[in-house]
Image (cartoon, rainbow, N blue to C red):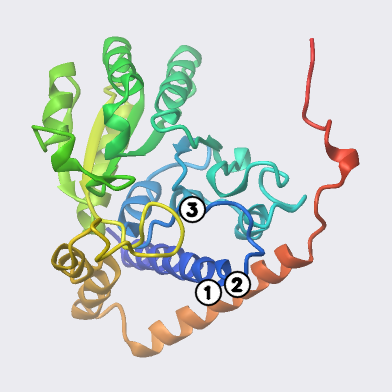
Amino acid sequence: MKSEKLIELYHTMVRIRMVEERIAAEYQYDEIKTPIHLSIGQEAIAAGVCIHLEKSDYLFGTHRSHAQYLAKGGDLKKMIAELYLRKTGCSHGRGGSMHLAAPEVGIFGSSAIVGGDIPLGTGTALASKLKKDGRVTAVFFGDGAVDEGTFHESLEFAALKNLPVLYVCENNHYAINSPESKRHRNLNIAQWVEGYAVPSYRINGNDVLEVSEYAREAIDDCRKGNGPVFLECDTYRWKGHIGTVDDVGNGYRPKEEYDYWLSKCPIQWYRQYLESIGLWDDAKEKAQREKIAAEIQEAFEFAQKSPKPSPEDLMDCVYSS
């Protein structure tokens, strides 16, 4: 991979982390009314996959999709405005954090229903095959979604029709507060998917280079007509299922487990890698973070100054036959 792409991966991860850290900091003031689901600790997956997607390719996310929205090219100002439920938001203040949309970059929407985005992405992949438009669909979901019937039905259908869709399972080992070990006897989800005759890989979701390499090959295969492909990305979210707390020490997550995964920070590891090959240093880090911080500040000011929907807007986007 070229040097500029290696640096782009790092920029994307740091930007996602800084945006979500600012969201967490602002949430305490209770001006952000929508529930939030943070993906701090999982940034390598969105960055590694989306760097290989074209603007016209489709992406579907879940209730936890800030990272995918930003990595695919969604407008930061519109995303923050959506968190504040303002008219200038990416869903016009009607969706909040769990329903982000940016059709201009191929994001038709995220779904708060667990597993709800999987058949939607399978549908756009079917449309792409029928239209022969060369587009690939990437569908992101967590390990909790694989317990849903829509997951298995979609995999079976996509395999049968040979659809250009990349299924990305962000396995952070918890469905809300239920550990994977309490839900699955076989902890290798990729192994399940092999039963549908779909190429399936279990990879280190905290290693952005590994994610990027597998995603590149998978997306190329899909574009050539050799899809679908399934990636199980082993990772961990630093925050709880919802909100800004970490849920450690309350009978939810063991501190030893939590500390282990913090030591596997995808951003820290990748920065050290870039420094080791001479592409990064403290001066570049400082300049990048200052630039991102200014962009984030501008986005929050834009959102906070934007108008709220009015009662007259209630019937907009409501249709009848």
| Quarter of the image where one finds residue 280 | bottom left
Residue 202 location, x and y as percent? Answer: 15, 41
Whether 311 is drawn above or below 158: the answer is below
Which disc number belongs to residue 295? 2
Of residues 103 and 189, the one drawn nearer to the viewer in this rendering: 189
- Front: mark 3 or 1: 3
Q: Are marks 2 and 1 in contact (CB under 8 Å)?
A: yes
Whether 278 is drawn above or below 76: the answer is below
| Crowding near the residue tagged with mark 3, few <14, some 14–19, many ≥20 C-alpha atoms within 10 Å | many
| Crowding near the residue tagged with mark 1, few <14, some 14–19, many ≥20 C-alpha atoms within 10 Å | some
The residue under label 1 is 292
The quadrant of the image that shows the C terminus is: top right
Q: Residue most toward the bottom?
A: 283
Q: What amino acid is found at the position of numbered circle 3 in the picture?
A: His
Of residues 62 and 113, the one drawn nearer to the viewer in this rendering: 113
Is disc 1 placed on a helix, strand or loop?
Answer: helix
Measure the C-alpha gap from mark 3 to mark 1: 16 Å
The quadrant of the image that shows the N terminus is: bottom left
Q: Residue at the location (40% across, 27% down)?
A: 118
As drawn, is 66 to the left or to the right of 194? right
Q: Earlier in the sequence, mark 3 or mark 1?
A: 3
- Front: mark 2 or 3: 3
Is disc 3 placed on a helix, strand or loop?
Answer: helix
Residue 288 location, x and y as percent? Answer: 46, 79
Q: Residue at the location (60% across, 42% down)?
A: 102
The residue under label 3 is 66
